[in-house]
Protein backbone atom coordinates (compact mmCIF):
# COMPACT_ATOMS: atom_id res chain seq x y z
CA UNK A 1 0.00 0.00 0.00
CA UNK A 2 2.91 2.32 0.74
CA UNK A 3 4.29 1.92 -2.78
CA UNK A 4 0.90 2.58 -4.34
CA UNK A 5 0.33 5.68 -2.23
CA UNK A 6 3.74 7.15 -2.93
CA UNK A 7 3.24 6.46 -6.64
CA UNK A 8 -0.07 8.33 -6.52
CA UNK A 9 1.47 11.29 -4.70
CA UNK A 10 4.36 11.39 -7.18
CA UNK A 11 2.14 11.24 -10.27
CA UNK A 12 -0.25 13.86 -8.89
CA UNK A 13 2.64 16.21 -8.09
CA UNK A 14 4.27 15.70 -11.48
CA UNK A 15 1.00 16.38 -13.30
CA UNK A 16 0.34 19.38 -11.06
CA UNK A 17 3.74 20.93 -11.72
CA UNK A 18 3.44 20.29 -15.45
CA UNK A 19 -0.01 21.85 -15.69
CA UNK A 20 1.01 24.80 -13.52
CA UNK A 21 3.75 25.68 -15.99
CA UNK A 22 1.26 25.95 -18.87
CA UNK A 23 0.41 29.28 -20.42
CA UNK A 24 -3.38 29.28 -20.09
CA UNK A 25 -5.04 30.08 -16.81
CA UNK A 26 -7.37 27.05 -16.78
CA UNK A 27 -4.59 24.42 -16.84
CA UNK A 28 -2.76 26.46 -14.21
CA UNK A 29 -5.75 26.31 -11.87
CA UNK A 30 -6.10 22.57 -12.57
CA UNK A 31 -2.40 22.15 -11.78
CA UNK A 32 -2.82 23.92 -8.46
CA UNK A 33 -5.76 21.64 -7.64
CA UNK A 34 -3.76 18.51 -8.42
CA UNK A 35 -0.86 19.80 -6.31
CA UNK A 36 -3.15 20.41 -3.37
CA UNK A 37 -4.58 16.87 -3.74
CA UNK A 38 -1.06 15.51 -3.71
CA UNK A 39 -0.09 17.44 -0.60
CA UNK A 40 -3.28 16.39 1.19
CA UNK A 41 -2.60 12.70 0.58
CA UNK A 42 1.02 13.28 1.61
CA UNK A 43 0.01 14.91 4.90
CA UNK A 44 -2.40 12.09 5.56
CA UNK A 45 0.30 9.48 4.98
CA UNK A 46 2.66 11.25 7.39
CA UNK A 47 0.65 9.86 10.31
CA UNK A 48 1.65 6.37 9.05
CA UNK A 49 -0.80 4.09 7.28
CA UNK A 50 -2.99 2.05 9.61
CA UNK A 51 -6.23 0.31 8.79
CA UNK A 52 -9.30 -0.15 10.95
CA UNK A 53 -7.96 1.54 14.09
CA UNK A 54 -9.80 4.24 16.05
CA UNK A 55 -8.25 7.70 16.37
CA UNK A 56 -9.79 8.36 19.82
CA UNK A 57 -8.69 6.81 23.11
CA UNK A 58 -11.04 4.07 24.24
CA UNK A 59 -10.94 1.38 26.84
CA UNK A 60 -9.50 -1.98 25.88
CA UNK A 61 -7.75 -0.79 22.72
CA UNK A 62 -4.00 -0.45 22.41
CA UNK A 63 -3.55 0.28 18.68
CA UNK A 64 -4.49 3.73 17.44
CA UNK A 65 -4.23 5.71 14.26
CA UNK A 66 -2.71 9.20 14.59
CA UNK A 67 -5.57 11.74 14.68
CA UNK A 68 -3.44 14.84 14.15
CA UNK A 69 -2.71 14.43 10.41
CA UNK A 70 -6.45 14.05 9.88
CA UNK A 71 -7.02 17.39 11.55
CA UNK A 72 -4.19 18.93 9.53
CA UNK A 73 -5.57 17.55 6.28
CA UNK A 74 -9.02 18.87 7.12
CA UNK A 75 -7.59 22.36 7.59
CA UNK A 76 -5.47 22.07 4.46
CA UNK A 77 -8.49 20.90 2.41
CA UNK A 78 -10.61 23.82 3.55
CA UNK A 79 -7.85 26.32 2.78
CA UNK A 80 -6.96 24.86 -0.62
CA UNK A 81 -10.66 24.67 -1.52
CA UNK A 82 -11.12 28.35 -0.75
CA UNK A 83 -7.93 29.28 -2.57
CA UNK A 84 -8.93 27.30 -5.67
CA UNK A 85 -12.29 29.03 -5.75
CA UNK A 86 -10.54 32.38 -5.48
CA UNK A 87 -8.05 31.49 -8.23
CA UNK A 88 -10.91 30.46 -10.56
CA UNK A 89 -12.78 33.71 -9.97
CA UNK A 90 -9.59 35.67 -10.52
CA UNK A 91 -8.85 33.76 -13.75
CA UNK A 92 -12.37 34.55 -14.98
CA UNK A 93 -11.89 38.20 -14.07
CA UNK A 94 -8.58 38.25 -15.95
CA UNK A 95 -10.28 36.63 -18.94
CA UNK A 96 -12.94 39.33 -18.91
CA UNK A 97 -10.62 42.27 -18.40
CA UNK A 98 -7.63 41.28 -20.49
CA UNK A 99 -9.60 39.72 -23.32
CA UNK A 100 -7.88 36.33 -23.34
CA UNK A 101 -7.00 33.50 -20.99
CA UNK A 102 -3.22 33.66 -21.24
CA UNK A 103 -1.64 34.08 -17.81
CA UNK A 104 0.33 37.09 -19.05
CA UNK A 105 -2.80 38.61 -20.52
CA UNK A 106 -1.48 38.66 -24.09
CA UNK A 107 -1.46 36.20 -26.94
CA UNK A 108 2.05 35.22 -27.89
CA UNK B 1 -4.32 40.83 32.47
CA UNK B 2 -0.70 40.25 31.60
CA UNK B 3 -1.38 36.65 30.71
CA UNK B 4 -3.81 37.60 27.97
CA UNK B 5 -1.61 40.37 26.61
CA UNK B 6 0.05 37.99 24.13
CA UNK B 7 -3.14 37.28 22.23
CA UNK B 8 -4.31 40.91 22.18
CA UNK B 9 -2.33 41.93 19.03
CA UNK B 10 -4.04 39.06 17.18
CA UNK B 11 -7.54 39.50 18.58
CA UNK B 12 -7.71 43.26 18.09
CA UNK B 13 -7.46 43.27 14.27
CA UNK B 14 -9.61 40.13 13.99
CA UNK B 15 -12.43 41.55 16.08
CA UNK B 16 -12.27 44.97 14.46
CA UNK B 17 -12.24 43.31 11.03
CA UNK B 18 -15.36 41.33 11.89
CA UNK B 19 -16.99 44.38 13.41
CA UNK B 20 -16.27 46.42 10.27
CA UNK B 21 -17.77 43.66 8.15
CA UNK B 22 -20.94 43.60 10.25
CA UNK B 23 -21.15 47.39 10.18
CA UNK B 24 -20.40 47.66 6.46
CA UNK B 25 -23.45 49.84 5.88
CA UNK B 26 -22.22 52.66 8.11
CA UNK B 27 -20.68 55.70 6.48
CA UNK B 28 -17.09 55.74 5.28
CA UNK B 29 -16.24 58.30 7.92
CA UNK B 30 -17.18 55.89 10.72
CA UNK B 31 -15.34 53.01 9.08
CA UNK B 32 -12.19 55.10 8.90
CA UNK B 33 -12.59 56.17 12.51
CA UNK B 34 -13.05 52.59 13.68
CA UNK B 35 -10.10 51.34 11.62
CA UNK B 36 -7.77 54.04 12.90
CA UNK B 37 -8.94 53.51 16.46
CA UNK B 38 -8.22 49.79 16.16
CA UNK B 39 -4.72 50.54 14.87
CA UNK B 40 -4.00 53.03 17.63
CA UNK B 41 -5.01 50.35 20.12
CA UNK B 42 -2.74 47.86 18.36
CA UNK B 43 0.22 50.21 18.53
CA UNK B 44 -0.31 50.75 22.27
CA UNK B 45 -0.69 47.03 22.92
CA UNK B 46 2.45 46.35 20.90
CA UNK B 47 4.43 48.89 22.92
CA UNK B 48 3.25 47.39 26.22
CA UNK B 49 4.03 43.87 24.98
CA UNK B 50 7.55 44.85 23.91
CA UNK B 51 8.19 46.49 27.27
CA UNK B 52 6.97 43.37 29.07
CA UNK B 53 9.15 40.91 27.19
CA UNK B 54 12.23 43.12 27.30
CA UNK B 55 12.00 43.57 31.05
CA UNK B 56 10.67 40.19 32.05
CA UNK B 57 10.58 36.61 30.81
CA UNK B 58 9.03 35.40 27.55
CA UNK B 59 5.26 35.36 27.51
CA UNK B 60 3.76 32.04 26.50
CA UNK B 61 0.02 31.72 25.90
CA UNK B 62 -1.40 28.22 25.68
CA UNK B 63 -4.56 28.40 23.56
CA UNK B 64 -7.46 26.62 25.25
CA UNK B 65 -5.02 25.89 28.08
CA UNK B 66 -3.65 22.88 26.20
CA UNK B 67 -0.04 22.73 27.30
CA UNK B 68 2.80 22.56 24.78
CA UNK B 69 3.78 20.48 22.92
CA UNK B 70 0.22 19.09 22.67
CA UNK B 71 -1.67 22.30 22.12
CA UNK B 72 -0.97 25.37 20.04
CA UNK B 73 0.96 28.08 21.85
CA UNK B 74 1.51 31.72 21.12
CA UNK B 75 4.96 32.91 22.12
CA UNK B 76 5.88 36.55 22.58
CA UNK B 77 9.65 36.68 22.63
CA UNK B 78 11.44 40.00 22.03
CA UNK B 79 11.78 39.32 18.30
CA UNK B 80 8.05 38.66 17.88
CA UNK B 81 7.16 41.75 19.93
CA UNK B 82 9.56 43.87 17.88
CA UNK B 83 7.97 42.70 14.62
CA UNK B 84 4.46 43.25 16.01
CA UNK B 85 5.32 46.85 16.91
CA UNK B 86 6.85 47.60 13.48
CA UNK B 87 3.81 46.12 11.73
CA UNK B 88 1.36 48.11 13.83
CA UNK B 89 3.22 51.40 13.23
CA UNK B 90 3.52 50.86 9.48
CA UNK B 91 -0.14 49.80 9.33
CA UNK B 92 -1.23 52.93 11.19
CA UNK B 93 0.39 55.32 8.71
CA UNK B 94 -0.62 53.30 5.66
CA UNK B 95 -4.23 53.37 6.86
CA UNK B 96 -3.98 57.08 7.58
CA UNK B 97 -3.02 57.63 3.94
CA UNK B 98 -5.73 55.29 2.70
CA UNK B 99 -8.32 57.30 4.62
CA UNK B 100 -7.78 60.20 2.25
CA UNK B 101 -9.73 58.52 -0.51
CA UNK B 102 -7.86 55.41 -1.63
CA UNK B 103 -10.13 53.25 0.53
CA UNK B 104 -13.16 54.17 -1.58
CA UNK B 105 -11.78 52.66 -4.78
CA UNK B 106 -13.25 49.26 -3.94
CA UNK B 107 -15.32 47.44 -1.38
CA UNK B 108 -14.35 46.13 2.05
CA UNK B 109 -10.97 47.86 2.13
CA UNK B 110 -11.01 48.35 5.89
CA UNK B 111 -12.09 44.78 6.60
CA UNK B 112 -9.33 43.34 4.43
CA UNK B 113 -6.78 45.71 5.92
CA UNK B 114 -7.57 44.53 9.46
CA UNK B 115 -7.51 40.88 8.39
CA UNK B 116 -4.14 41.40 6.75
CA UNK B 117 -2.83 42.73 10.06
CA UNK B 118 -4.45 39.78 11.82
CA UNK B 119 -2.51 37.37 9.61
CA UNK B 120 0.76 39.29 10.00
CA UNK B 121 0.61 39.57 13.78
CA UNK B 122 -0.44 35.93 14.10
CA UNK B 123 2.48 34.78 11.95
CA UNK B 124 4.90 36.64 14.22
CA UNK B 125 3.41 35.41 17.49
CA UNK B 126 2.64 31.78 16.83
CA UNK B 127 4.84 29.05 18.23
CA UNK B 128 3.47 26.24 16.09
CA UNK B 129 4.60 25.43 12.57
CA UNK B 130 1.21 24.43 11.18
CA UNK B 131 -0.39 27.44 12.83
CA UNK B 132 2.25 29.55 11.06
CA UNK B 133 1.03 28.06 7.77
CA UNK B 134 -2.57 28.96 8.64
CA UNK B 135 -1.61 32.55 9.49
CA UNK B 136 0.38 32.76 6.24
CA UNK B 137 -2.76 31.74 4.37
CA UNK B 138 -4.81 34.36 6.21
CA UNK B 139 -2.41 37.15 5.42
CA UNK B 140 -2.09 35.98 1.83
CA UNK B 141 -5.83 35.76 1.28
CA UNK B 142 -6.27 39.28 2.64
CA UNK B 143 -3.35 40.46 0.51
CA UNK B 144 -4.95 39.01 -2.65
CA UNK B 145 -8.01 41.10 -1.95
CA UNK B 146 -5.99 44.20 -1.14
CA UNK B 147 -3.78 43.84 -4.20
CA UNK B 148 -6.86 43.78 -6.42
CA UNK B 149 -8.35 46.75 -4.57
CA UNK B 150 -9.23 49.40 -7.13
CA UNK B 151 -9.35 46.91 -10.02
CA UNK B 152 -7.92 47.55 -13.48
CA UNK B 153 -6.28 45.14 -15.95
CA UNK B 154 -2.78 45.88 -14.65
CA UNK B 155 -3.74 44.80 -11.13
CA UNK B 156 -5.61 41.75 -12.32
CA UNK B 157 -2.62 40.53 -14.29
CA UNK B 158 -0.18 41.14 -11.43
CA UNK B 159 -2.72 39.62 -9.03
CA UNK B 160 -3.01 36.38 -11.01
CA UNK B 161 0.75 35.87 -10.95
CA UNK B 162 0.93 36.75 -7.26
CA UNK B 163 -1.85 34.33 -6.33
CA UNK B 164 -0.52 31.42 -8.38
CA UNK B 165 3.07 31.68 -7.13
CA UNK B 166 1.92 32.01 -3.53
CA UNK B 167 -0.38 29.00 -3.84
CA UNK B 168 2.56 26.99 -5.12
CA UNK B 169 4.55 28.28 -2.13
CA UNK B 170 1.81 27.18 0.27
CA UNK B 171 1.92 23.68 -1.20
CA UNK B 172 5.66 23.51 -0.61
CA UNK B 173 5.11 24.74 2.95
CA UNK B 174 2.69 21.88 3.57
CA UNK B 175 5.14 19.34 2.15
CA UNK B 176 7.82 20.65 4.52
CA UNK B 177 5.47 20.63 7.53
CA UNK B 178 4.30 17.13 6.64
CA UNK B 179 7.85 15.82 6.38
CA UNK B 180 8.79 17.26 9.78
CA UNK B 181 5.67 15.80 11.35
CA UNK B 182 6.36 12.45 9.74
CA UNK B 183 9.87 12.36 11.23
CA UNK B 184 9.26 13.83 14.69
CA UNK B 185 5.52 13.62 15.34
CA UNK B 186 5.35 17.19 16.60
CA UNK B 187 4.78 20.63 15.12
CA UNK B 188 5.50 22.80 18.14
CA UNK B 189 8.52 24.89 17.19
CA UNK B 190 10.25 24.58 20.57
CA UNK B 191 9.68 20.82 20.64
CA UNK B 192 10.90 20.53 17.04
CA UNK B 193 14.03 22.50 17.96
CA UNK B 194 14.80 20.04 20.75
CA UNK B 195 14.24 17.02 18.50
CA UNK B 196 16.22 18.42 15.56
CA UNK B 197 19.22 18.81 17.86
CA UNK B 198 19.10 15.14 18.73
CA UNK B 199 18.51 13.98 15.18
CA UNK B 200 19.87 10.52 14.33
CA UNK B 201 22.08 9.96 11.28
CA UNK B 202 19.36 8.09 9.39
CA UNK B 203 16.88 10.92 9.87
CA UNK B 204 19.21 13.76 9.00
CA UNK B 205 18.63 13.64 5.25
CA UNK B 206 14.88 14.06 5.63
CA UNK B 207 15.30 16.75 8.27
CA UNK B 208 17.63 18.80 6.09
CA UNK B 209 15.28 18.36 3.15
CA UNK B 210 12.37 19.71 5.18
CA UNK B 211 14.48 22.60 6.41
CA UNK B 212 15.53 23.57 2.91
CA UNK B 213 11.93 23.32 1.69
CA UNK B 214 10.92 25.71 4.49
CA UNK B 215 13.81 27.98 3.50
CA UNK B 216 12.53 27.95 -0.08
CA UNK B 217 9.04 28.95 1.06
CA UNK B 218 10.31 31.79 3.26
CA UNK B 219 12.69 32.91 0.49
CA UNK B 220 9.70 33.11 -1.85
CA UNK B 221 7.83 35.33 0.61
CA UNK B 222 10.93 37.42 1.22
CA UNK B 223 11.58 37.77 -2.54
CA UNK B 224 15.09 36.37 -2.29
CA UNK B 225 16.78 35.81 -5.66
CA UNK B 226 15.91 33.74 -7.71
CA UNK B 227 12.36 33.84 -6.28
CA UNK B 228 11.97 37.63 -6.53
CA UNK B 229 10.44 38.02 -9.97
CA UNK B 230 6.85 38.31 -8.74
CA UNK B 231 7.54 41.30 -6.51
CA UNK B 232 8.13 44.33 -8.79
CA UNK B 233 4.98 43.78 -10.84
CA UNK B 234 2.77 43.08 -7.83
CA UNK B 235 4.01 45.93 -5.64
CA UNK B 236 4.04 48.54 -8.38
CA UNK B 237 0.49 47.61 -9.41
CA UNK B 238 -0.98 47.81 -5.89
CA UNK B 239 -2.72 50.91 -4.51
CA UNK B 240 -0.26 53.12 -2.59
CA UNK B 241 -1.33 52.33 1.01
CA UNK B 242 -1.54 48.63 0.15
CA UNK B 243 1.95 48.69 -1.36
CA UNK B 244 3.18 50.46 1.77
CA UNK B 245 1.71 47.73 3.98
CA UNK B 246 3.07 45.01 1.67
CA UNK B 247 6.60 46.20 2.46
CA UNK B 248 6.26 44.32 5.75
CA UNK B 249 5.18 41.13 3.94
CA UNK B 250 8.64 40.49 2.56
CA UNK B 251 9.90 40.89 6.13
CA UNK B 252 7.64 38.02 7.22
CA UNK B 253 9.78 35.81 5.00
CA UNK B 254 12.94 37.26 6.53
CA UNK B 255 11.48 36.64 9.99
CA UNK B 256 10.78 33.02 9.02
CA UNK B 257 14.34 32.55 7.81
CA UNK B 258 15.68 34.02 11.04
CA UNK B 259 13.53 31.69 13.16
CA UNK B 260 14.55 28.73 11.03
CA UNK B 261 18.21 29.61 11.35
CA UNK B 262 18.30 30.42 15.07
CA UNK B 263 15.57 28.32 16.67
CA UNK B 264 14.68 25.26 14.59
CA UNK B 265 18.09 24.62 13.07
CA UNK B 266 20.00 26.58 15.68
CA UNK B 267 22.13 23.80 17.09
CA UNK B 268 22.96 20.17 16.52
CA UNK B 269 24.01 18.17 13.48
CA UNK B 270 21.81 20.09 11.05
CA UNK B 271 22.88 23.54 12.27
CA UNK B 272 24.84 24.33 9.10
CA UNK B 273 21.67 24.06 7.03
CA UNK B 274 21.64 27.57 5.56
CA UNK B 275 25.35 28.40 5.78
CA UNK B 276 26.05 27.60 2.16
CA UNK B 277 22.98 29.35 0.81
CA UNK B 278 21.97 32.45 2.70
CA UNK B 279 24.93 34.82 2.23
CA UNK B 280 25.53 34.17 -1.51
CA UNK B 281 21.81 34.45 -2.27
CA UNK B 282 21.44 37.62 -0.19
CA UNK B 283 24.38 39.25 -1.95
CA UNK B 284 23.01 38.20 -5.35
CA UNK B 285 19.69 39.75 -4.35
CA UNK B 286 21.54 42.98 -3.58
CA UNK B 287 23.23 42.97 -6.99
CA UNK B 288 20.07 42.19 -8.96
CA UNK B 289 18.03 44.63 -6.86
CA UNK B 290 20.50 47.39 -7.67
CA UNK B 291 20.35 46.56 -11.37
CA UNK B 292 16.55 46.62 -11.19
CA UNK B 293 16.61 50.03 -9.51
CA UNK B 294 18.93 51.33 -12.25
CA UNK B 295 16.79 49.90 -15.06
CA UNK B 296 13.35 51.01 -13.86
CA UNK B 297 11.42 53.40 -16.05
CA UNK B 298 8.78 54.39 -13.53
CA UNK B 299 8.95 55.51 -9.90
CA UNK B 300 6.69 52.86 -8.38
CA UNK B 301 8.59 50.05 -10.07
CA UNK B 302 11.84 51.59 -8.91
CA UNK B 303 10.60 51.58 -5.31
CA UNK B 304 9.50 47.96 -5.68
CA UNK B 305 13.05 47.11 -6.74
CA UNK B 306 14.30 49.07 -3.73
CA UNK B 307 12.25 46.67 -1.60
CA UNK B 308 14.08 43.75 -3.25
CA UNK B 309 17.36 45.54 -2.54
CA UNK B 310 16.44 46.03 1.11
CA UNK B 311 15.63 42.32 1.45
CA UNK B 312 19.14 41.64 0.17
CA UNK B 313 20.71 43.94 2.79
CA UNK B 314 18.54 42.54 5.57
CA UNK B 315 19.34 38.92 4.79
CA UNK B 316 23.03 39.76 4.36
CA UNK B 317 22.96 40.99 7.94
CA UNK B 318 21.13 37.86 9.15
CA UNK B 319 23.51 35.64 7.18
CA UNK B 320 26.55 37.26 8.80
CA UNK B 321 25.07 36.02 12.04
CA UNK B 322 26.30 36.48 15.56
CA UNK B 323 24.93 39.15 17.86
CA UNK B 324 26.35 41.90 15.65
CA UNK B 325 24.85 40.64 12.41
CA UNK B 326 21.38 39.87 13.74
CA UNK B 327 21.23 43.11 15.74
CA UNK B 328 22.26 45.08 12.63
CA UNK B 329 19.52 43.37 10.63
CA UNK B 330 16.94 44.08 13.33
CA UNK B 331 17.93 47.75 13.31
CA UNK B 332 17.80 47.90 9.52
CA UNK B 333 14.39 46.17 9.39
CA UNK B 334 12.17 48.94 10.83
CA UNK B 335 14.17 51.56 8.94
CA UNK B 336 13.58 49.88 5.60
CA UNK B 337 9.90 49.23 6.36
CA UNK B 338 9.21 52.86 7.27
CA UNK B 339 11.32 54.37 4.47
CA UNK B 340 9.96 51.99 1.83
CA UNK B 341 6.37 52.50 2.94
CA UNK B 342 6.77 56.28 2.97
CA UNK B 343 8.32 56.16 -0.50
CA UNK B 344 5.33 54.26 -1.93
CA UNK B 345 2.95 56.84 -0.41
CA UNK B 346 4.99 59.77 -1.73
CA UNK B 347 5.20 58.18 -5.20
CA UNK B 348 1.40 58.09 -5.27
CA UNK B 349 1.18 61.77 -4.33
CA UNK B 350 3.69 62.67 -7.04
CA UNK B 351 2.07 60.49 -9.68
CA UNK B 352 -1.35 62.00 -9.09
CA UNK B 353 0.04 65.49 -9.70
CA UNK B 354 1.89 64.55 -12.87
CA UNK B 355 -1.20 64.51 -15.01
CA UNK B 356 0.42 63.46 -18.29
CA UNK B 357 3.27 61.18 -17.31
CA UNK B 358 2.06 59.69 -14.01
CA UNK B 359 4.95 58.03 -12.26
CA UNK B 360 6.87 57.30 -15.47
CA UNK B 361 10.25 58.97 -15.83
CA UNK B 362 9.14 61.24 -18.65
CA UNK B 363 8.88 65.00 -18.94
CA UNK B 364 5.69 66.51 -17.63
CA UNK B 365 4.24 69.92 -17.03
CA UNK B 366 5.62 71.92 -14.11
CA UNK B 367 4.74 70.04 -10.95
CA UNK B 368 2.43 71.72 -8.49
CA UNK B 369 3.92 71.89 -4.99
CA UNK B 370 7.25 70.67 -6.25
CA UNK B 371 9.11 72.12 -3.27
CA UNK B 372 7.44 70.07 -0.58
CA UNK B 373 7.24 66.92 -2.71
CA UNK B 374 10.80 67.35 -3.91
CA UNK B 375 12.07 67.96 -0.40
CA UNK B 376 10.43 64.78 0.86
CA UNK B 377 11.73 62.87 -2.15
CA UNK B 378 15.24 64.09 -1.33
CA UNK B 379 15.00 63.03 2.32
CA UNK B 380 13.59 59.61 1.39
CA UNK B 381 16.28 59.10 -1.25
CA UNK B 382 18.93 59.83 1.37
CA UNK B 383 17.23 57.42 3.76
CA UNK B 384 16.97 54.60 1.24
CA UNK B 385 20.43 55.03 -0.24
CA UNK B 386 21.94 55.03 3.26
CA UNK B 387 23.67 58.40 3.36
CA UNK B 388 24.56 60.10 6.65
CA UNK B 389 23.10 61.41 8.87
CA UNK B 390 19.89 59.35 8.50
CA UNK B 391 18.91 55.91 9.72
CA UNK B 392 19.83 54.16 6.46
CA UNK B 393 23.43 55.11 7.11
CA UNK B 394 23.36 53.78 10.67
CA UNK B 395 21.80 50.52 9.43
CA UNK B 396 24.40 50.04 6.71
CA UNK B 397 27.19 50.98 9.10
CA UNK B 398 26.03 48.30 11.56
CA UNK B 399 25.83 45.71 8.78
CA UNK B 400 29.34 46.53 7.58
CA UNK B 401 30.65 46.44 11.14
CA UNK B 402 29.15 42.98 11.54
CA UNK B 403 30.92 41.94 8.34
CA UNK B 404 34.35 42.90 9.69
CA UNK B 405 35.09 39.51 11.21
CA UNK B 406 33.48 37.49 8.43
CA UNK B 407 35.62 35.71 5.82
CA UNK B 408 33.40 37.17 3.08
CA UNK B 409 34.14 40.76 4.09
CA UNK B 410 35.50 41.80 0.68
CA UNK B 411 32.33 40.66 -1.08
CA UNK B 412 30.01 42.26 1.48
CA UNK B 413 31.86 45.59 1.46
CA UNK B 414 32.08 45.78 -2.31
CA UNK B 415 28.46 44.85 -2.96
CA UNK B 416 26.82 46.85 -0.16
CA UNK B 417 28.84 50.01 -0.85
CA UNK B 418 28.70 49.65 -4.64
CA UNK B 419 24.95 49.04 -4.44
CA UNK B 420 24.57 52.16 -2.30
CA UNK B 421 26.46 54.28 -4.82
CA UNK B 422 24.43 53.00 -7.76
CA UNK B 423 21.21 53.57 -5.81
CA UNK B 424 22.19 57.20 -5.21
CA UNK B 425 22.90 57.68 -8.93
CA UNK B 426 19.62 56.05 -9.94
CA UNK B 427 17.57 58.08 -7.45
CA UNK B 428 19.32 61.33 -8.39
CA UNK B 429 18.46 60.61 -12.00
CA UNK B 430 14.83 59.87 -11.30
CA UNK B 431 14.53 62.90 -9.02
CA UNK B 432 15.91 65.22 -11.66
CA UNK B 433 13.53 63.86 -14.29
CA UNK B 434 10.54 64.08 -11.94
CA UNK B 435 11.17 67.55 -10.61
CA UNK B 436 13.45 69.43 -13.04
CA UNK B 437 12.75 68.25 -16.56
CA UNK B 438 9.46 69.96 -17.25
CA UNK B 439 7.89 70.74 -20.54
CA UNK B 440 5.99 73.99 -20.94
CA UNK B 441 2.38 72.96 -21.01
CA UNK B 442 -0.91 73.85 -19.47
CA UNK B 443 -0.95 76.45 -16.80
CA UNK B 444 -0.31 74.70 -13.47
CA UNK B 445 -2.44 77.22 -11.64
CA UNK B 446 -5.68 75.71 -12.88
CA UNK B 447 -4.65 72.25 -11.74
CA UNK B 448 -3.59 73.59 -8.41
CA UNK B 449 -7.14 74.02 -7.28
CA UNK B 450 -8.21 70.45 -7.94
CA UNK B 451 -5.06 68.40 -7.43
CA UNK B 452 -3.41 70.00 -4.44
CA UNK B 453 -6.27 70.66 -2.11
CA UNK B 454 -5.01 69.01 0.98
CA UNK B 455 -1.36 68.48 0.34
CA UNK B 456 -0.23 68.98 3.90
CA UNK B 457 -2.77 66.52 5.32
CA UNK B 458 -2.10 64.16 2.44
CA UNK B 459 1.59 64.06 3.23
CA UNK B 460 1.06 63.70 6.98
CA UNK B 461 1.55 59.89 6.93
CA UNK B 462 4.73 60.27 4.86
CA UNK B 463 5.99 62.82 7.36
CA UNK B 464 5.07 60.49 10.22
CA UNK B 465 7.05 57.62 8.74
CA UNK B 466 10.04 59.89 8.08
CA UNK B 467 9.76 61.04 11.68
CA UNK B 468 9.92 57.41 12.85
CA UNK B 469 13.15 57.02 10.84
CA UNK B 470 14.48 60.13 12.58
CA UNK B 471 13.57 58.58 15.92
CA UNK B 472 15.65 55.59 14.85
CA UNK B 473 18.65 57.89 14.31
CA UNK B 474 18.26 60.05 17.39
CA UNK B 475 17.51 57.05 19.56
CA UNK B 476 20.09 54.89 17.81
CA UNK B 477 21.75 54.06 21.14
CA UNK B 478 18.66 52.73 22.93
CA UNK B 479 17.35 51.03 19.77
CA UNK B 480 20.69 49.34 19.27
CA UNK B 481 20.57 48.15 22.87
CA UNK B 482 17.10 46.68 22.25
CA UNK B 483 18.11 44.91 19.04
CA UNK B 484 21.19 43.54 20.80
CA UNK B 485 19.01 42.13 23.57
CA UNK B 486 16.79 40.51 20.94
CA UNK B 487 19.77 39.08 19.08
CA UNK B 488 21.38 37.71 22.24
CA UNK B 489 18.15 36.01 23.16
CA UNK B 490 17.80 34.54 19.66
CA UNK B 491 21.24 33.02 19.88
CA UNK B 492 20.26 31.24 23.09
CA UNK B 493 17.32 29.15 21.91
CA UNK B 494 17.28 27.37 25.30
CA UNK B 495 15.47 30.40 26.73
CA UNK B 496 12.68 30.06 24.17
CA UNK B 497 12.52 26.29 24.54
CA UNK B 498 12.46 26.38 28.34
CA UNK B 499 9.75 29.01 28.36
CA UNK B 500 7.52 26.95 26.07
CA UNK B 501 8.16 23.43 27.31
CA UNK B 502 8.86 24.15 30.95
CA UNK B 503 11.89 22.63 32.66
CA UNK B 504 12.13 19.63 30.33
CA UNK B 505 13.42 21.71 27.45
CA UNK B 506 17.10 21.44 28.16
Image: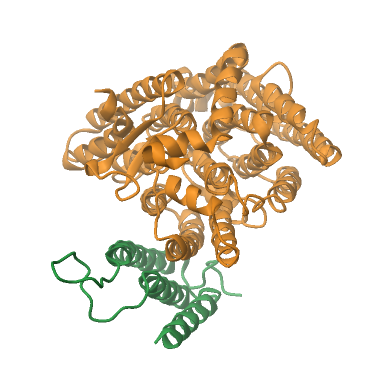
Chain colours: A green, B orange
* Quadrant assignment, res B376: top right
Give x and y (percent) for residue B157.
Answer: 50, 60
**In the current view of this chain or complex, which residue is farthest to the top?**
B474
**Can see residue B121?**
no
**Can see residue A42?**
yes
* Quadrant assignment, res A64: bottom left
Give x and y (percent) for residue B315.
Answer: 65, 41
Q: Is residue B237 above or below residue B487?
A: below
Kindly identify the residue that appears in the image at 46 percent across and 21 percent down.
Answer: B54
Give x and y (percent) for residue B150.
Answer: 40, 47
**In the current view of this chain or complex, which residue is farthest to the left?**
A59
Q: Is residue B50 above or below residue B213?
A: above
Q: Is residue B389 above or below residue A81?
A: above
Q: Nearer the viewer, residue B505 or B59?
A: B505
Assign the N terminus of chain B to one quadrant of the image.
Answer: top left
Q: Nearer the viewer, residue B455 or B171?
A: B171
Amino acid sequence: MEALLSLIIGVLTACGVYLMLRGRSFPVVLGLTLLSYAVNVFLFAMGRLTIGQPPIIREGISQYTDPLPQALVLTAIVISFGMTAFAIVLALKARAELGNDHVDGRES
Amino acid sequence: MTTHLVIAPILLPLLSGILLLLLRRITVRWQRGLGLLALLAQVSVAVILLQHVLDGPLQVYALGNWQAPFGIVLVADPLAAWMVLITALLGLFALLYACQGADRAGRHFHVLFQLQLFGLQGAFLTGDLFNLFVFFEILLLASYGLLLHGSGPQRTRAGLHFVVINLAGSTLFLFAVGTLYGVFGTLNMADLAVQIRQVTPEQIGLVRLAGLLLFGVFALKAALVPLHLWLPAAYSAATAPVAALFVIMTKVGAYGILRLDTLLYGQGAAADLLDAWLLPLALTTLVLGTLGVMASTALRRQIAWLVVLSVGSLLTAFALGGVNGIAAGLYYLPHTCFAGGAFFLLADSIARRRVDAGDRFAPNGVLVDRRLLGGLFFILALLVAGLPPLSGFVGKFLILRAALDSPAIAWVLAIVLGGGLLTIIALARSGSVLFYRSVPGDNPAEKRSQAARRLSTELLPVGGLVLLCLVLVIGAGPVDAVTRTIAEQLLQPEIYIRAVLGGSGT
